Amino acid sequence: MNDPKTHPVEGWAEVDFNSEPFLTDFKEVYQGMHNSRCPFAHSSSGDHYAVASHSEIMSILKQYDVWKSKYGPALDYLETPGVLVSVDPPDHTFEVRIVADCFSREVFNSLVPDMEAFVNARLDEVSGSGEMDLHDVISVPFPLFVIHKLLGYPLEEPDGTSRIGFIRDGIIAGVGMMLQPSGSREENMARLPADDPGLLGAVRTQQMYVDHLADCKAKLESGEWQNDTNIVCRFLTTPGPDGSFLSDEKILGFMGFLETAGSATTTIMLSNVVHRLLTEPGAYERVCRDPALIPLAIEETLRLDAPVQGLFRTNDEPVDLNGCPLEVDTKVMLLWAGANLDPEVFEDPMSFSLDRDLSKVRRHLAFGYGTHFCRGAPLARLEGEILLKALLPRLKNLRLNGEVVMEKRIPVLQGIRHLPVAWDL
């Protein structure tokens, strides 16, 4: 997989998806691709192509026999199978059956009281101060709290100290390398200094998973826990169609994937939607007056500010991509964020509007499409609704309170790093 498979293509954009100019003005880049009527790109740093056309991405995702996930959703090529987004049927079908049982609407609804209590407790802590960094106080810990409830282990160490810091360090380091132009993420992580916070965070988080898996096994065996106590217990006790069970390696992979995918993207969504409401003229006031607009505000934010720029597929046979021949196993980035700005699908796509038809807005690809559609999408939407329904009535005249800092440490994601807000006491 080391020989280059791609090259600049006449008429296609040349984009460095890791560069500061792109991370600052990526929407303008996507708009330019659409305006050129050639929404395709070649990476000027990294051996891959990219597609921003909504219809072309949909077409690729429907060709299950051609476009595969087996080499993973990042730029590097996985040498061993991952989980969910990194496998194809029939393995994917087996894994989805297990996850579907754990990620049901019934399970999500059972978490609502705890989620509401968590958000309100956070607001209780800061409401008298009149200001906070909403990203740090709520957007980061809230999704982690939810995922940890599902996985069944606390967000605090036995001595009461928070695990959030090292978990986030590990996530940022690992996901931040998804678009690295050379070497696997494991190799790039191994090159970090021994005292690097990201490396230390990844190691501590992995050990946390190992310890929790052993704890679940022991408590299942003793009868202290049952097969539905948490997701890990379900993984250990749910057989596939042939009667086999997930291996320990697969379960550990699931724990890492669910913690990362279930927290990092939702964290971005939460801060993005509050930021949109506070910066789009009249949006905050309209949603405060009419909370029924909350689902539309969330969907329109997901469309315009998709948390994930895009993920990769590889072709299992030679194909033609808009006139460009691709050899087998070429990495192609499907740009969810770019497709969500496609004027062929969304009218005035660069504008945020609370007057759109909700069903049409939900044509966005922020959660992917098809076989690998995000199983946690309903949970992310639920977290967004719970946050806004708690936040807007309690913090009067909510407003920005300083510089909003964008997150640029994770090129494959796009969102906010600091969101200072204030309100009237």
Image: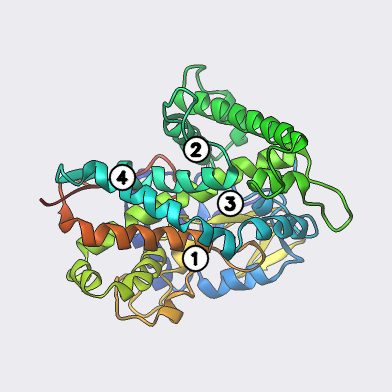
State the residue at coordinates (70%, 58%).
96
- Secondary structure at badge 2 equals helix
Classed neighbour count for the residue bearing mark 3: other residues with Cα under 10 Å, few (<14), some (14–19), many (≥20): many
Q: Which mark is residue 171?
A: 2
Cα gap from disc 3 to disc 1, whole angstroms: 14 Å
Q: Which residue is mark 4?
A: 122
Instruction: Give the residue type at disc 2.
Output: Ile
Cα gap from disc 4 to disc 3, whole angstroms: 43 Å
Query: Taking the image as drawn, is residue 220 in sight?
Result: yes
12 with respect to 124 (left or right): right
Q: Nearer the viewer, residue 415 or 391?
A: 391
Report x, y in % for residue 319. Answer: 71, 65
Cα gap from disc 4 to disc 2, whole angstroms: 23 Å
State the residue at coordinates (38%, 44%).
140
Q: Which residue is mark 3?
A: 48
Q: Earlier in the sequence, mark 4 or mark 1?
A: 1
Q: Earlier in the sequence, mark 4 or mark 3?
A: 3
Instruction: Give the residue type at disc 4.
Output: Arg
Q: Which residue is mark 1?
A: 52
Q: Nearer the viewer, residue 324 or 108?
A: 108
Q: Earlier in the sequence, mark 3 or mark 2?
A: 3
Q: Earlier in the sequence, mark 4 or mark 2?
A: 4
- Secondary structure at badge 3 equals loop
